[in-house]
Amino acid sequence: MSPRSLIYASFDRYPSPKGAATHIGAFISALAQNHLPVKLVTVAATPTMTTKTISETNTASYEQIELPALGSTLIERVLCFRTHLKHWWRNQHPHIAHVRSIYEGYPIARRKDNWCDQLVLEINGLPSIELKYHYPQVADDRELMHKFIAQEQACLDKADLILTVSQVNAAHLLQRGVPANRLCVIPNGADTTLFPYQPPKEWGDREISLLYSGTFSTWQGVQVAIEALGLCRRQFPARLTIVGSGRAGQIRMMREFAAHLNIGDQLQILESVSQPELALLHHAADVVLVPLMPNDRNLVQGCSPLKLLEAMSSGTPVIASEMPVVTELARHEVEALLVRPGSPKAIAEGLIRLRHEPALRLRISKQARKRVEQHFTWQLSQRRLIEAYRRLT
């Protein structure tokens, strides 16, 4: 790839324990290593702008600019970030602007010629679909939702290259008029070094350890996992560890729900941890749960669940919702046990089956690791990204 200046902008904090930061790290590393002069623009943790140079290797370095995003609401934070982005960008005109959402992408798409030569847009989430799960009140604000849809469409229309993580999302974007030749699907990956393989442990009659990792949003199905624990404990002893990020109210509701089911002592809720710490939790667990819910966020917008890929890499058997975004990555009874979405009973039945079939646990563990190594490493995703850039340039 010939050297071309690039600004990668994201309305996210980086680094952070969130999956978005893992994705950003993989992409920015690949772009920096392929001789692009790269600047990474992210959200600052402080009210002031900061600039630093990041050197990953002798041949890969980039400049990171952190811009404030202040405010008591999402809209205020977005507008603050956009204002700082416009001010900072005045002396920039990169060959390529790469954005991860409409929050930073819309001002660029609106006056693309003033900002850059070419625009690369990642679709990891569409506010018109998923924002209502974070802020339920926006579902009834038709004017706000209309603005989101219009800004999404402006970004889609102006982008020279659109990257998405799943075939489900690609199908949705095609329905919204995105030309197929501007669309590229690059699924998430797993770091097989950070998540090394360990075969599943013997269960015997001991207490079984279940793990859920990720956000506590309703589309993730955390409540279903808790209810499944209650059903499971009628058959054999088990406990559930939930690790991730959520609001205080969400955590309180989960604890109250567990107490209502008389399993409060068997539920552990941890804050987000680093990836090495998460890998240790995977290896300490007997089963990882990926209980995605059957809603438009998962069935229409789509996703590429990082928690699933990291569990598959670690060798811990997985029980996951059987839906297209999952079956793109893992097959039933081959790399995971797939069950009816939204059903605590189906998860509990899956756990009982794994308890009685140690050969199945071992088979899906080995096959899951093999599938990740062959199809879903971050190295493969990085190669797909660089190939997409070559087609762009």
Image: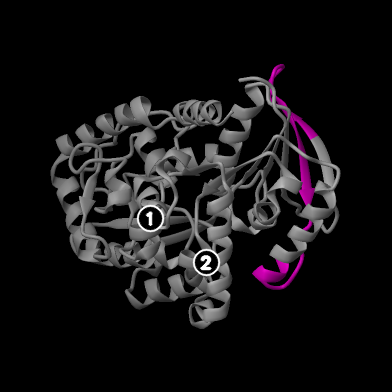
Q: Secondary structure at mark 1?
A: helix
**Magenta region includes residue 55:** yes
* Residue extending farthest top: 58
* Residue positioned 72% across, 17% down in the render: 58
Image disc number at residue 200: none
Q: Judge from the rendering whether residue 78 lies leftward or rightward of residue 310; answer left or right.
A: right
Choose between 134 and 97: the one closer to the eye: 97
Q: Which mark is residue 172?
A: 1
| 151 relative to 280 in the view: left or right | right
Would you name the residue on which mark 2 appears?
A: 149
Mark 1 residue crowding within 10 angstroms, few (<14) / some (14–19) / many (20+): some
**In the rendered structure, which amino acid carries the disc numbered 1?**
His
On the image, the x and y values in percent for residue 16 come to 63, 47
Q: Distance between the Cα atoms at labels 1 and 2? A: 13 Å
Quadrant where the N terminus is found in the figure:
top right
Query: Residue 65: x and y, percent?
Result: 78, 43
Identify the magenta region: 53-77
The percent coordinates of residue 10 (x first, y second) are 65, 49
- In the displayed structure, 210 sits above or below 260; it is above
Q: Of label 1 and label 2, which has the lower sequence position? A: 2
Residue at image coords 69%, 52%: 108
Q: Amino acid at mark 2?
A: Ile
Q: Residue at x 84, y 48 (%)?
A: 90
Check the picture and name the quadrant holding the C terminus.
top right
How packed mark 2 is, by other alpha carbons closer than 10 Å (few <14, some 14-19, many 20 or more), is some
